[in-house]
Image (cartoon, helix red, strand yellow):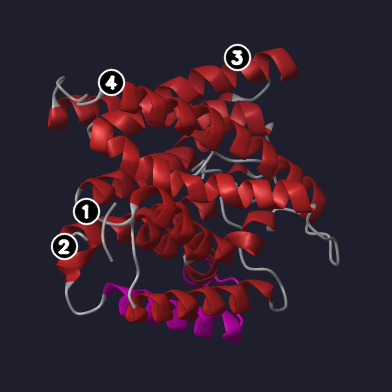
Amino acid sequence: MTNRTPPAPPSAPPSAAVRPGARLPLVPAVGFVLIWSSGYIVGPWGVEAMSPLALVAARFVLAAVLAAVVARVLRGPLRVSRGDVLRIGLSGFVLNGVQFAAMYLAFDRGMGATLGSLMHSLSPVLTAVLAAALLRERLRPVQVLGFAVGVAGVLLVLGPDLQEAGGPVAVGLGVVSVLGLSLGTLGQRWIGHAPDPLWSAAIQFGVSAPPLVVLALLVEGTDVVRDPLQAGASLALLVVVNSLVGLFLLGVLVRARGAGAAGSVFFLMPPVTAVMAWLALGETLGVREVLGLVVTIVAVAAATRSGTPVAPVPPEPGTRPTEAPR
């Protein structure tokens, strides 16, 4: 798979009870899938023009300010205890900061958009596996099988030569990213209730930004922009479209279907990303990679659509008891 992206992946909306039989509204669902998937295109495009840590740090600084302004106008002043701010911030840092920083670094090392999306598509099932291991929640056999087959599909896409995927470091960063996404999803339960999604997003972005700014300065220095126009355009898309519009659409889905709304369509992200990556980035897939993509998609779809829903996905983007937009 050739390189060419998000997350990347909005921040965290509120908890909502799953409504059995409720259907997702078509237009918001399609919009959410397209916006979430586009994050995997804009991310790699952005790191071509700007250093990866600086890009994600700038994204969170701008998204935090914009989310806070919108929240203040639409929701009024922040009414959250200091303890809740701490819990929202820490879980949000893992969910957003770790997830996106690791994935953008992987993109910078050559990981393709489709592979990044495919690895993240395992998150709903991985979250269920981690919930069973860490919280002793019940794990259904179909979830175990779905995770195992999904991982096998990813390994099939990777193939024998990891250099085609950016090398071992890029793949390792991808693993760290999906772990951050899944652990951040579990961390949302620590909050214990459903905070306002706009203020929650502002807090999560705001807490994620400072350590990433410091890390970017230490690792990448100050000469981080290679193409100002492209860097600015990618930031605008990541902040406004992926973070805020994605968060709004996620909220619509959560109100219609419950907290597992994002997880129920997560398996659609890799094929949509693959088409976008082909059109926008010139990424192409061989027979082996297409086969691995199909195997993972089917496995995740089966695990997230059978019986009781798996633990919901957070991004951004980046939601489970809260979910994260890209």
**Tag 2 residue:** 167
The circle drawn on residue 110 is 1
- Which one is closest to the eye, mark 1 or mark 2? 1
Range of magenta residues: 131-158
Residue 309 in the image, given as x and y percentages of width and height? 68, 69
| Mark-to-mark CA distance, 1 and 3 | 36 Å
**First of labels 4, 3 by sequence position:** 3
Q: Position of residue 170 (x, y in %)?
A: 22, 57
The type of residue carrying mark 2 is Gly
Image position of 182 with respect to 191: above or below: below
- The answer to whether residue 137 is above or below residue 109 is below
Marks 2 and 3, how far apart in space? 41 Å
Q: Is residue 89 above or below residue 171?
A: above
Residue 125 in view of the camera: yes
Mark 2: which secondary structure? loop
Mark pair 1, 2: CA separation: 8 Å
Secondary structure state at the residue bearing disc 1:
loop
Mark in front: 2 vs 3: 2
- Front-most of 197 and 132? 197
Nearest the eye: 245 or 215: 245
At x 46%, y 33%, the residue is 238
Q: Which residue is mark 4?
A: 228
Residue drawn at x 30%, y 48% as measured from the top left: 102
Q: Are marks 1 and 3 in contact (CB under 8 Å)?
A: no
The disc labelled 1 sits on which kind of residue? Answer: Gly
Camera-near label (4 vs 3) is 4
- Where is mark 3, residue-wise? 69
